[in-house]
Amino acid sequence: MRIPDKHILVIFGASGDLTYRKLIPSVYDLYSQNLLPEQFGILGVGRTALSHDAFREKMEDGIDDFALTTKDKEKKKAFLNKLYYYAFNTKEGNEYAGFKNELLELNHQLNTGNNFIFYLATPPSMYPIIPKYLAKNGLNDETDGFKRLIVEKPFGYDLESARELNHSLLKEFNEHQIYRIDHYLGKETVQNLLVTRFSNGIFEPLWNRNFIHHVEITSSEDIGVGNRGGYYEGSGALRDMVQNHLLLLASLVAMEPPALINADSIRNEIVKVLQSLRPIPVEKVEEFVIRGQYTASEVKGKKRNAYREEEGVNPKSRTETFVAMKFFIDNWRWAGVPFYIRTGKMLPTRVTEIVIHFQSTPHHLFANDKAIQRQQNQLVIRIQPDEGLLLKFGMKVPGAGFNVQDVNMDFHYSELSNTYLPSAYERLLLDGMLGDATLYSRGDAVESAWAFVEPILKAWKERPCIKVHGYPAGTWGPDISDDLIEGAQTWRYPCKNLAGDGDYCEL
Ligand code: BG6
């Protein structure tokens, strides 16, 4: 395994939740697997005044609660000694000189060769501001060492703001210095999509409109908005999940084979898919997109609040906590194949999966039995949990006649001898440190995804007559989302266990 060059990782927003729950535990996991360079440090930046030791103590709790590797006491102590903290008001341009001094001092002390990674884990309003002041202080200049920017989501609020953000970042930094995070690309099972498709001779020849009937992608969560009501209220499921994670999954399912496994080749293919999405006209949004919001109910004997009762949420809110939609990809491979995606909070279970529904056989030889209902092979690619692959096919029921029943052939990651699945942040941080942007989003892809959701946002804003359907917390969203699917098909209603479908579970 390649070890990154020496550097300092500067985290803006170091007193926030993301740093505590994801970033520091992930860097610790890298450290405990000996994947960090010898000369390395983390400089946390926040507004709250904290001593280095107080910051270390707080981060130790985060490691204890969220790191995935074993927590060896000595290792943890050595790692915590690499953590430093500096408080300043990042909105004030004149405070950056002090920050720069601190950083250069640390760089000198740790001998990190002027290589810096700046991670923006702040509220999005700071994304254009911090890079501007970094650049004013020469901290974008790579003549004496690399300078990289990692930008958290949300990248923009709509097409215009995403364009503005790209424009403002590109004024100060080059594209190769900018790493836009979509943590779904960091997931092992999402990367496995490429391997499943492009390393198996049996799938790729069938992977097109001639053999695939439709594609279904679900990303459901069984929790509500928790303490993020304030953020979510201004976002909603379309911005929070569809514009980024779900369109990314659809792109990986639909993309052409890249020429090479590198940042340019893969990202070129992703952007081509996003540019081929058939726009949904504003006046047709209701036909193609269903929005919903959870209402109060009782789940497993526990009372669940309605979304409108959550902290930070407008009691008359029309923000969607559920989206289901149908769309098409206008290119040679996918012409006419419907893609269905759905995501929501407070659904029965937490599952992300892709279901490829193959065309049924051209002639139903065994049409007098259950095969008539089945008719289609399905390949289920489970992203989480119970990560794995499931292929459904018809088998003869032993005995007289030719009765057909559906059976499962399944592989679970848990069956591998080395079952350590690195977290998405661990993988992405390591790649950022190595200067590999393959699993980060490129500016044009982010803008294309925004361009696709733009008419939906516009329709919802300008046409209040478009219904926000209520669904009781703990159910699979508004019933009407079943009507999106063409023909007699329905969504697959997945369980926690990959192969445990067909039962009505979780409720
Ligand atoms: C985040 C969203 O990007 O993804 C959250 O802001 C959502 O609302 C989360 O809960 C889901 O990520 P995961 O990795 O748990 O599927």
Image (cartoon, helix red, strand yellow):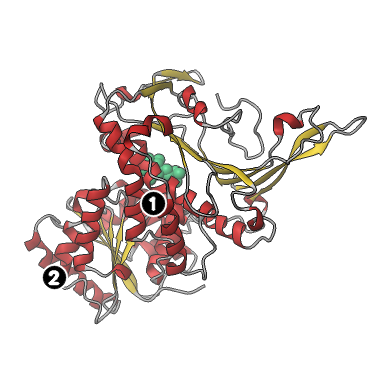
* Foreground pick, 189 / 18: 189
Q: Which residue is mark 1?
A: 22
Above or below, 295 relative to 498: above
Which residue lies most toward the right here? 400
Position of residue 426 measured from the top left corner of the image (x, y, whole percent): 44, 59
Element marked by disc 1: helix
Q: Can you tell me which quadrant of the image ligand 1 is in?
A: top left
Position of residue 318 relative to residue 26, above or below, is above
Mark 1 nearby-residue class (10 Å; few <14, some 14–19, many ≥20):
some
Q: Which of the image's four quarters has the C terminus?
A: top right
Q: Residue at x 25, y 35 (%)?
A: 230
Residue 207 is situated, as x and y percent measured from the top left of the image, at: 61, 53
Choose mark 2 or mark 1, whichever is in front. 2
The residue that disc 2 covers is: 137
Residue 462: which quarter of the image? top left
Q: Say whether residue 219 is left or right of residue 409.
A: left
Q: Is residue 180 visible?
A: no
Q: At numbered mark 2, what does the secondary structure look like: helix, strand or loop?
A: loop
Mark 1 is on which residue type?
Answer: Lys
The residue drawn where x is 18% and y is 59% is: 130
Which quarter of the figure has residue 108? bottom left
183 in relation to 499, above or below:
below
**Above or below, comparing residue 1 to residue 407 in the picture:** below
Q: Residues within 10 Å of mark 2 (few under 14, many from 20)?
A: some
- Splitting the image into 4 quarters, where does residue 473 fall? top left
- Residue at point 32% right, 70% down? 176
Q: Nearer the viewer, residue 226 or 88?
A: 226
The outermost residue toward the bottom is 144
Q: Tell me if the residue at label 2 has its CB under 8 Å from ligand 1.
A: no
**Which residue is the extreme one toward the left?**
94
N-term mark: 2 or 1 = 1
Q: CA distance from mark 2 to mark 1?
A: 29 Å
